[in-house]
Every structure is written in structure tokens, then in C-alpha cells.
Image: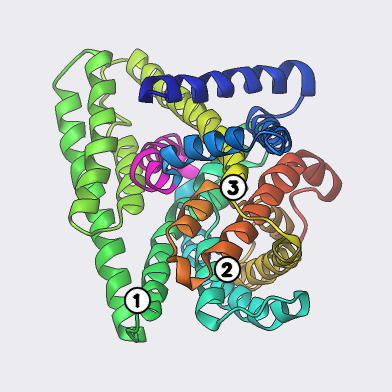
């Protein structure tokens, strides 16, 4: 199958499953799309029991996609830029303390809690994983996924301040998560990363990514000021999103944080000097369309991954165990961090339960799991990660409306 045919097949599946989600299932598009793709993949697996050639064809087809490269070095930059560019900067500024503490300390504490709990709990289901393997899982599952979180916030009526907390955390904690993941990767290869090295890596990669994104956004903004054509302005923002992310990767800086900084900074620089309202409207509409189309494609790809992941009784048990551990740890860490925020900012309004349940995991975690060396437990980590992601997107994301109605968003915990 040609590349064009493969792309056409994925986009057609995303469009048809999206239509069925809205018209038949009455589900949010991304959730319905993922459920339908998973079901279609399972049906294909069952049918292929009679025709092994069909299974080999399907696995080969999915293998050609190279999910981790497509996400980490392709779609992620556009999705992060779009999410950051469309943020409400007023509320993000008000919630900067909560966002900062959740992004840094929340990610660190969650990684430690999940890794430790999993290391001692996995033998209960017959899986004896090493400490490094559990650390791998902890680092890739701890950061909340910006793609999944932002998609949920677009369709759920969450108050603006909590939207800013959830969205801001999910956009900024990737830098911390990436540094932790690289540190564990170094440890798995025999190196012994110390705290000073990790802190320096975090400072250089994260700080460098933020500075690069801000500088490129300023340059782009100056170019946009000198042209009165929204088509050119859209092309300039697209160039910023793609070229900036690629440049950050080339310079070994945090490309995700570069994309986030570029989106936020460009929004800030352009608040007062876009030539007309049509420029604001055209840019917002363009990036919302880019965001929605990529989300549809991403969730089709997530569903197709069922075909290449090795599931068995043990991995289903480890997945169920991990779901409980991740959910409990997330809730405990959010409660501790936000209690600290309330001590510093008296009267700070938030919702511990909403932030805990709304911290979704998504395709980024699976992409990181696929990049783990085979000898480091990739088989069980990938299967377990996939089950946590499916639970997060379908159950947590799908019940967020009901959750808000049941518990409200102003509870004090």
C-alpha cells in the first residue's frame, strides 16, 4: 500500500468513525472514534484467526506508521502550539503558581509514588519487574497528556480557572517528564545520573526551549505586524510551529516546551497589534481545525495499536493494578500540592477532585513506551500503558461531565 493510500485510509476512518460517534453513539468524537477503532481492530484480530495472512497484513500496515516518531517528531509540535495559542492568558497568569507547582513537583512526586507502588505491587499479579522498568513506567505515565486534556476541556464545561490549571499543567509538565525519562534511559544503559546532573539537564533543556520559543514568537510577531493579509499570518504561525519544534530538537532543547512557549508568547505579542478582527478570527479558527483534525487522526492511530501490542492475562492484571495506583497517586499528589498553593495564596479557588480526575493520559505516554528498549520490559510496559490510557480517555474523559455534576467544582478538600 502506498503512503498516499495509507494516509487516505486513516483520514477516512477518522471521518467515518467521527460521524458515527456523533450521529449514532452520541459520544464525544474522540472517545467514540477510539472505541470504534479498538472494536474494529479486535474484529480484525478475530477474523484473522482463520486467515493468518490477514493478521500479518494488518500488523505490517500499523508497523509502517511508526507511531512514536509520528507523535514525538510530528503531530506533537502542532498540537502543543495549537493548545498553547488558544489558551486564555488572563486565567493562566492568575493560576501560574498552581500550574508551576503541579508541573514540577507534581510530576516528580507522582513519578516516585507510582514507580515505588508498582515495584512492590506487581509481584502480586505474577510480574517481577526491575526497579528501572518501574521507573520507566512512572516517568512516562506521570505527566498528564496535553493532547487528551485539551481535547476534553474543549467539550466539557469546566470553570476557567480550573481549565487554566489543567491545561497549563499538561502543557508544561512535559519538560519535566522528558528529563526524567532521559535520566532513567541513561541509568538503564549503565550510567548513574545524580541529582545535580538532572537539575542541570532540566534547566538547560526546559529553559532553553522556553527561551527559544519566546524569541521565535517575537520574530514571527514582528513579521506579522508588517503584513495585512491573514493568509500570510496563518502561514507564518504554521512555520513557527513546525520549524521552531524542529530547531529545538536539533539543538537538543525541550521541543515540547518550545512549542508551548511559542504559542503563548505569540498570543501575547499579537494581542494589541493584529490588523483586524478577521486576523484574530482566522487564526483561532485555523488552529482549532488543525487541533480537531489531528485529534481525530491520533485517536484512530491509538485504536489501531491494539493490533501490535502483546496482551495476556498478566498484562491485563498489571493494567488494572496500574489504573488503581495511578488514580490514587494522582489524587494524593494533587491534594498535597494544592494544599501548599492554598497556604501561599489564601482563598485560592480550585477543585482537587476535578483536577485529579481530569489529569488524563494519552498518546504521548504510548509513544514514549514504544521508545523503551526491548530489554527494559517494553512488552509489559507498553501493554500496561495502553490499558491505563484507554481507561483514562474513555472512562475519565467520558464521565467528566457526570463527574462535575455529581461532585461540583468548588469542593474544598
Q: Crowding at label 1, few (<14), some or many (≥20) Cα neighbours within 10 Å?
A: few
Q: Is residue 301 visible?
A: no
Residue 370 is situated, as x and y percent measured from the top left of the image, at: 47, 56
In the displayed structure image, the side of residue 118 where residue 169 appears, left or right: left
The quarter of the picture where the C terminus appears is: bottom right
Comparing 136 with 219, the one in front is 136
Q: Crowding at label 2, few (<14), some or many (≥20) Cα neighbours within 10 Å?
A: many
Numbered circle sitting on residue 186: 1
In the displayed structure image, the side of residue 71 where residue 309 appears, left or right: right
Residue 60 is situated, as x and y percent measured from the top left of the image, at: 48, 38
CB atoms at circles 2 and 1 under 8 Å apart?
no
Secondary structure found at label 1: helix
Q: Is residue 277 visible?
A: yes
The quarter of the picture where the N terminus appears is: top left
Work out how far the residue at label 2 is from the one at label 3, CA to CA, in angstroms: 14 Å
Looking at the rendering, the stretch of residues picked out in magenta corresponds to: 68-91
Instruction: Give the mark nearest the N terminus, 2 or 1.
Output: 1
The residue that mark 3 highlights is 161
In the displayed structure image, the side of residue 288 where residue 219 appears, left or right: left
Instruction: Give the mark nearest the N terminus, 1 or 3.
Output: 3
In the displayed structure image, the side of residue 110 where residue 39 appears, left or right: right
Q: Up-down: is 98 above or below 398?
A: below
Comparing 312 with 39, the one in front is 312
Residue in the image at 69% along x and 63% along y? 315
The residue that mark 2 highlights is 341
Secondary structure found at label 3: helix
Q: Is residue 80 magenta?
A: yes
Amino acid at each position: 500500500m502506498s503512503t498516499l493510500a495509507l494516509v487516505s485510509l486513516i483520514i477516512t476512518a477518522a471521518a467515518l468513525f467521527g460521524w458515527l460517534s456523533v450521529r449514532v453513539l452520541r459520544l464525544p468524537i474522540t472517545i467514540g472514534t477510539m472505541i470504534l477503532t479498538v472494536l474494529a481492530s479486535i474484529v480484525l484480530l478475530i477474523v484473522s484467526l482463520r486467515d493468518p495472512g490477514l493478521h500479518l497484513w494488518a500488523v505490517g500496515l500499523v508497523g509502517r506508521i511508526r507511531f512514536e516518531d509520528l507523535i514525538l517528531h510530528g503531530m506533537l509540535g502542532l498540537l502543543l502550539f495549537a493548545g498553547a495559542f488558544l489558551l486564555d492568558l488572563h486565567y493562566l497568569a492568575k493560576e501560574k503558581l498552581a500550574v508551576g507547582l503541579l508541573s514540577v513537583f507534581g510530576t516528580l512526586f507522582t513519578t516516585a509514588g507510582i514507580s515505588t507502588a508498582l515495584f512492590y505491587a506487581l509481584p502480586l499479579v505474577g510480574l517481577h519487574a526491575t526497579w528501572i522498568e518501574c521507573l520507566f513506567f512512572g516517568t512516562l505515565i506521570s505527566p498528564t497528556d496535553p493532547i487528551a486534556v485539551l481535547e476534553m476541556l474543549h467539550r466539557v464545561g469546566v470553570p476557567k480557572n480550573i481549565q487554566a490549571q489543567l491545561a497549563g499543567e499538561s502543557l508544561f509538565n512535559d519538560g519535566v517528564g522528558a528529563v526524567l525519562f532521559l535520566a532513567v534511559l541513561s541509568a538503564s544503559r549503565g550510567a548513574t545520573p545524580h541529582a545535580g546532573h538532572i537539575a542541570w539537564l532540566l534547566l538547560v533543556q526546559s529553559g532553553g526551549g522556553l527561551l527559544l520559543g519566546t524569541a521565535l514568537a517575537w520574530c514571527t510577531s514582528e513579521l506579522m505586524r508588517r503584513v495585512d493579509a491573514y493568509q500570510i499570518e496563518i502561514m507564518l504561525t504554521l512555520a513557527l510551529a513546525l520549524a521552531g519544534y524542529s530547531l529545538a530538537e536539533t539543538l537538543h532543547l525541550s521541543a515540547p516546551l518550545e512549542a508551548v512557549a511559542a504559542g503563548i508568547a505569540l498570543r501575547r505579542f499579537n494581542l494589541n497589534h493584529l490588523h483586524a478582527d478577521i486576523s484574530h478570527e482566522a487564526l483561532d479558527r485555523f488552529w482549532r481545525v488543525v487541533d480537531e483534525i489531528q485529534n481525530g487522526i491520533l485517536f484512530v492511530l491509538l485504536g489501531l495499536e491494539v493490533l501490535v501490542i502483546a496482551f495476556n492475562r498478566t498484562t491485563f492484571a498489571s493494567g488494572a493494578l496500574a489504573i488503581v495506583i495511578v488514580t490514587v497517586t494522582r489524587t494524593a499528589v494533587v491534594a498535597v500540592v494544592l494544599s501548599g498553593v492554598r497556604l501561599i495564596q489564601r482563598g485560592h479557588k480550585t477543585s482537587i477532585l476535578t483536577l485529579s480526575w481530569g489529569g488524563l493520559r494519552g498518546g504521548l505516554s504510548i509513544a514514549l513506551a514504544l521508545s523503551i528498549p526491548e530489554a527494559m520490559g517494553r512488552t509489559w510496559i507498553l501493554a500496561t500503558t495502553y490499558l491505563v490510557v484507554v481507561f483514562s480517555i474513555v472512562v475519565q474523559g467520558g464521565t467528566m461531565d457526570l463527574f462535575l455534576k455529581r461532585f461540583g467544582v468548588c469542593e474544598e478538600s
